[in-house]
Amino acid sequence: MLYEELMFDASLLLRFNIFKYLNQSTKKILAISQLSEDLDLNYQQSVIELNEVDQELAEIRPDHETIMMRAGKLNLENLNATVDEYRYHLLQQAVPFQFILYFLNDANPTIEQFCEKYFVSRSTVSRKIDKLKKHLKRFNIRFTYTEAGMSGDERLIRLALFDLLWLGTRGIECPINVDKHQLTKIIDTYKDYFPLSQTYFGTQEIKLFTSINMVRVQKKKFTKYDPRYNFLMKDNPYYDFTSLRDLIDMPMTTRQLKGETSFIYFLAHYSPFYTIRDDQSMKQALHDFDSRPNPVNDFVTEFRNFAKKVLFPDRPDIMDDPLVVSNMLNITFGYFIFRQPFPSMIELVLDPNAKQTRGEYILFQNIQNFMQMTKENPSYSFISSVHPMITRAFKRLLLPYFNQFPYAHNLKVGIALEHNAIFVRDLYRFLEDLRFIDAEPYDVSLKDDYDLIISSSSLLRKEKPNIPLFQLDFPYTKNELVPLYLELRNIYDKKNRVYE
């Protein structure tokens, strides 16, 4: 289930989808009837919801000018909020988001006080957090109510909190109340361990991660040291286990300090964070994973050898690319530690029901075959319960490198334009640059063999109603070729989806 579906009730979700639709439109003036048709709403419902959206935009920007016009039209030039701003505004009305921020920021949170503060009944809270509750149950995390909060593995709780808060704020605001001076000191001490520190958004993510760690420690919700960290962290001088004591202004036992410090370092290694080649933390990770015998490095090495032969026989060097190797190590390390599903931002933003292309399906099947064989190896017993998740993660990581074209069917495009080289030259050049297009002058004898006809006339729409027709008027500009590309890509993706 996608993030907004988890967090919003039906009313908030509808308004969010309406705003996204408006924000993505390329039109300056839009008919409400068009919106109603595209979103499958009745006209009156559209007007009511649009007035709500308009009012909320005024709350976000006091100088907002209405988007509502006469004659059933919308002025989209007056949209003056971004998608992330509008999402965050709606989230502050959403019970799941309110509840999370309440138990993080309140000193003594209880369900009774929450209901009183937000004027909701306990049954309403239970109903509106039900989808999120089911999502968290996958990670053995549960909501608690006597003391409002969450129970389960504290590491998983913090990962879940990060995903739910980051996807709601995207860095525009840090909604957790912590001491800013202490926050800065902790970040400055540990940021170099994180590949995230190399990018602008990464620094914002570190800020939120650290804020969550701080507020959970303040509430005496501690993480524990996991012996599975040993091969990476034990007696490794790179990892400093002494500094945290001087950065936290509350008494902690040696065991608690060790658990919290180790979790900071775990956060640098649980997800495919590496995107920059000249990254010292990546080089250190590659060194550390290779320094001592461990099943994570052995498993990744075995997969790389398999992939060189089966997935990338023409480009085996891909599997020696430090970026690829380090990210596979991080993916595997997370599952080696938890041996179960754990919160992942990817799962909340990528549609789980999206159909695969043929090439994607081939890649997935090959990786899955490797996992099925390897899970029987006692050395890699840790993958027995998580190999489907590692398969998906490896597929997503490797898909950009995988040559899908041998498994794909190109589009056959017929060009039905005036016979003038000056008219058609730029169009043919544009289509030749697209690897998935086979274009030729339209041949009437081919009947229904074309995936798309490009024409300057609507005449063929009457003669060939079953074949999609893209009408390109003269004189066309490069800007007008953008919608053509989107149409071609859409048809290509549909043609190459796998429906097994």
Image (cartoon, grey):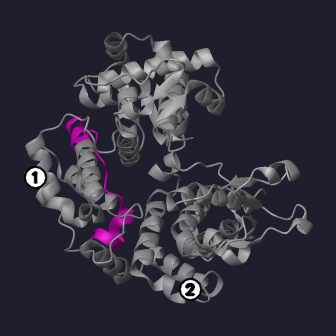
| Magenta range | 214-234
> Viewer-proximal residue, 98 or 32?
32
Q: Amino acid at mark 2?
A: Asn
Q: How many numbered marks appear?
A: 2
Residue 107: x and y, percent?
A: 22, 25
Mark 1 closeness class: few <14, some 14–19, many ≥20 residues within 10 Å: few
| Mark sitting on residue 214 | none
Query: Disc 2 designates what residue?
Result: 305
Give the residue drawn at x 35%, y 79%: 286
| 218 relative to 285, above or below | above
Q: Earlier in the sequence, mark 1 or mark 2?
A: 1
Q: Is residue 73 left or right of residue 211?
A: right
Query: Disc 1 designates what residue?
Result: 185
Mark 2 closeness class: few <14, some 14–19, many ≥20 residues within 10 Å: some
Tell whether position 228 is magenta: yes
Give the residue drawn at x 80%, y 51%: 459
The span from disc 1 to disc 2 (Cα, nearest Å) is: 43 Å
Q: Secondary structure at mark 2?
A: helix
Q: Is residue 353 left or right of residue 7?
A: right
Is residue 129 among the parts visible in the rendering?
Answer: no
Residue 273: x and y, percent?
A: 37, 64
> Quarter holding the N terminus?
top right
Residue 169: name its quadrant. Answer: top left
> Viewer-proximal residue, 101 or 333?
101
Residue 109: x and y, percent?
A: 29, 22
| 202 relative to 157, above or below | below
Q: Secondary structure at mark 1?
A: helix
